[in-house]
Image: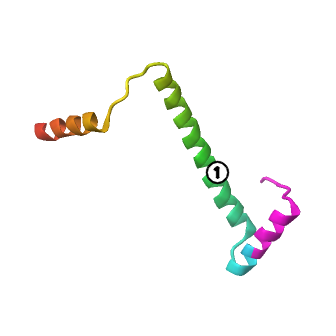
């Protein structure tokens, strides 16, 4: 279990949403946290990929990828 202290205004808004939708405050906190964590994971992945490109890792144009996929499809 995790206890979180929220600023009054945020708590008020969360409480209002919870009452209007008949869903628990925990439900909304969990949804928001899941989305935030996924966003952070995506950001870190993008940052790692950017660093590889910055260090010289080869990139491919859309045309190169399409041509490769076409060749692969022709094989099957």
In the image shown, does 72 or 65 lie closer to the viewer? 65
Q: What residue do we see at 71% from left, 60% from top?
A: 29
Q: What residue do we see at 52% from left, 36% from top?
A: 46
Residue that carries the numbered disc 1 in the rendered image:
36
Left or right of 71 on screen, residue 61: right
Displayed quadrant of residue 62: top left
Residue 44 location (% of width, % of height): 58, 36
Left or right of 7 on screen, residue 36: left
Q: What residue do we see at 53% from left, 36% from top?
A: 45
Residue 6 location (% of width, % of height): 84, 58
In the image shown, does 49 or 73 lie closer to the viewer? 49
| Residue most extreme to the top | 55
Left or right of 54 on screen, residue 60: left
SS category of the residue bearing label 1: helix
Residue 2 inside the magenta-drawn segment = yes
Residue 23 location (% of width, % of height): 69, 74
In the image shown, does 3 or 71 lie closer to the viewer? 71
- Residue range in magenta is 1-16
Disc 1 residue crowd, few under 14, some 14–19, many 20+, Cα 10 Å? few
Compared to residue 54, the image places residue 22 above or below, namely below
Residue 21 inside the magenta-drawn segment = no
Q: What residue do we see at 33% from left, 31% from top?
A: 60
Displayed quadrant of residue 7: bottom right
Residue 27 location (% of width, % of height): 68, 65
The mark total stands at 1
What quarter of the picture does the C terminus occupy? Answer: top left
Left or right of 74 on screen, residue 53: right
Q: Which colour scheme is used?
A: rainbow
What quarter of the picture does the N terminus occupy? Answer: bottom right
């Amino acid at each position: 279990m995790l206890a979180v202290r929220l600023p009054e205004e945020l708590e008020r808004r969360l409480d209002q949403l919870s009452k209007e939708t008949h869903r628990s405050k925990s439900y909304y906190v969990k949804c928001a946290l899941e989305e935030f964590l996924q966003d952070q994971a995506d950001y870190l992945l993008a940052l790692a990929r950017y660093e590889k490109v910055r260090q010289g890792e080869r990139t491919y144009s859309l045309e190169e990828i399409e041509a490769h996929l076409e060749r692969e499809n022709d094989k099957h």
